[in-house]
Amino acid sequence: MNPGQEQFFNFLMERIQDEHKNTAKEMMEENFRQQAAGTFTREHMAETQAALIKLLKPQYVAEVKAAMAHFASQMS
């Protein structure tokens, strides 16, 4: 995990419902593996984002959506 990924991972994990932290961790680790391999796609990102939104504590949904939109805008 690179420093930017680690920062986003920690940001996200603080906002995930406790009972869903393992699921979210597994999804994020898979995304990071795909990013490292160069196989991470916008489609996969959209699927992961939709799944992660469902695992968030409700008060953090808008904040995390904004962070995810920023990340998506950075993808080439």
Image: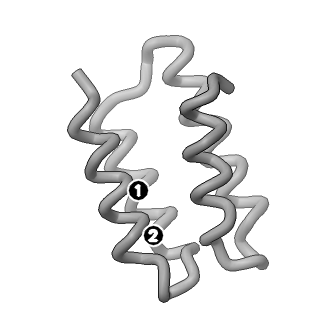
**Number of marks in the rendered image:** 2
Identity of the residue drawn at 34% across and 64% down: 65
Q: Which residue is mark 1?
A: 49
Classify mark 1: helix, strand or loop.
helix
Mark 2 crowd level (few <14, some 14–19, many ≥20, 10 Å Cα): some
The answer to whether residue 9 is left or right of residue 40 is: right
- Which amino acid type corresponds to the residue marked 2 in the rendered image? Ile
Task: Name the quadrant of the C terminus.
Answer: top left
Identity of the residue drawn at 28% across and 36% down: 42
> Do the CB atoms of the residues marked 1 and 2 lie less than 8 Å apart?
yes
Q: Which residue is mark 2?
A: 53
Of residues 69 and 3, which is closer to you in this image?
A: 3
- Which amino acid type corresponds to the residue marked 1 in the rendered image? Gln
Mark 1 crowd level (few <14, some 14–19, many ≥20, 10 Å Cα): some
Q: Position of residue 34 (x, y in %)?
A: 53, 24
Identity of the residue drawn at 50% across and 22% down: 35
